[in-house]
Image (tube, rainbow, N blue to C red):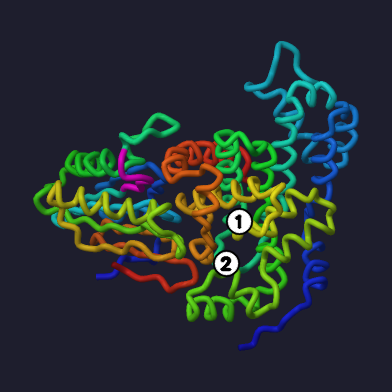
Amino acid sequence: MPPNLESPPPELIVGIGELKESKNPQGVIVTYALGSCLGVTCYDPVSRVGGMLHAMLGDSKAGHQTAPVRAAFLDTGVPDLIQRVIDLGGNPRVFEFKVFGGAQSVQATDYFNIGSRNIKSMEDLGAQLQLQIKVWDVGGPQNRTLRFYLQDGRVKLRKPGQPETFL
Amino acid sequence: MSTTVIPLPQLVEKARNLPCAPWLLPKLLEQLNAQDTTADQIEALIKLDSGLATETLRLANSAYFSGAIPCASFTDAIVRLGFREMYRLATTKIASRWLTNPAQGYGWEPGDLYRHSLTVAVGADLLAKKLGSVTPEIAYTAGLLHDVGKLALAYVCSASFEDIRRFQAEKRCPWREAESALLGYDHTDVAGALLRTWSFPPNLIEVVSFYPRPRLATAEHRALVTCVHAAKHLALCLGTGVGEDGFTTELDEAIMAELGITPELLESLLPAVLEGSRKLLQSEMPG
């Protein structure tokens, strides 16, 4: 059933390096302009609780210029996302994940490829944590805006200059 | 194809009519760079822009800069802030008004061009501090201005964007090349022409003209242009304000390597670019 868009549902905005979760089945979690970052949604279709992570890089242990923020990195952000949804009453055995982002310049090679390295990190993490990842919409030369509907777990995806799609 | 080509001089003339043109900025930058400039001379210039003058006093009296005695005069405020801070303030205030002019194109949401430009500015500033061969204040200004040609194109030629979009998708070429193929010029040509009409210094004209292709810059300014080229790609990674053309921007990895810009360096700067641009956007975003 498509989400009811007649009256705007409450929206939670997830900035870069943040994660938000909700148990409001009418709620929507939004993140704008995913570039090479990854947006990861985690959803329990039974209890209809879920959360979204907007991670910038894969590895929190690499030498960065500022102190690491856990949600900015996949290796710390994804486990935190899972725990937050469990804390809302979610059952990790039925969690469904969707992964978006990882855009890359059309001329990038192995030299400067944060997008594809993020995708590889998420693939490794998914295998390591045995995550049920139902959607991968990653790579390519576009940024992405996501709207995650807790009513049914669908994600509305917008890319600049393209029609919106539900995944 | 229905693209109507407007000659470049005519386009530049139309773009100059956009509100809040940054005509004062090159005069201020020249004064702030000169060795013998006094605070009185800067005061005379900033008083020409009431918004900048007010912001100068506000910032000088903010918690970060304020001393025991509040600044009541512009001269006191300029001395307290210092010329380096004035440089950043003037650039940000003046450029932000121009860059937030509404225009249809590049898949922008309102404010996207300014958000992206500010992120490039912060990235260029941080990268310049690491490199040592580029002056950070100039890198910041260059980053903020690098895409001014896009605003002009979007303002004057928005009807051509559907054709440009189709051409780019078909040829899978950089968006800039699609502009050039259909219009006879691209946003970097427009930016160069605009900055020349406003008498900006040659280093900034080279940045806006060559940031996608830093090898075309003169040897004198190539490091600055390459710094902005790299900062552009850092900002693309973050995605803030990136339009539909963003990831088709040319990437010259070899020239970055020649300047010592390694992938590890760029990646290590990313969290600081995010933090710096977020702080500025929270405090500076007009409207």
Amino acid type at circle 2 is Tyr
Image coordinates for residue B172, horizontal then vertical, percent:
48, 75
Query: Can residue B89 be seen at all in this image of the molecule?
Result: yes
- Contact between marks 1 and 2 (CB within 8 A): the answer is yes
Residue segment shown in magenta: A53-59
- Give left or right: position of B78 versus A25: right
| Nearest the eye: A58 or A157 | A58
The residues bearing labels 1 and 2 have C-alpha atoms spaced at a distance of: 9 Å
Image coordinates for residue A35, horizontal then vertical, percent:
43, 55
For image coordinates 68% across by 37% down, the residue present is B137
Q: Outermost residue toward the left?
A: A93
Image coordinates for residue A75, horizontal then vertical, percent:
26, 41
The part of the image, by quadrant, that contains residue A65 is top left
| Position above or below: B153 against A16 | below
The chain carrying label 1 is B
- Residue underneath mark 2: B106
The chain carrying label 2 is B
For image coordinates 58% across by 48% down, the residue present is B120
Checking the image for residue B136, the label placed there is none
Mark 1 neighbour density, 10 Å: few (under 14) some (14–19) many (20 or more): many
Amino acid type at circle 1 is Leu
For image coordinates 62% across by 68% down, the residue present is B104
Mark 2 neighbour density, 10 Å: few (under 14) some (14–19) many (20 or more): many
In which quadrant is the C terminus of chain A drawn? bottom left
Residue A49 belongs to magenta span? no
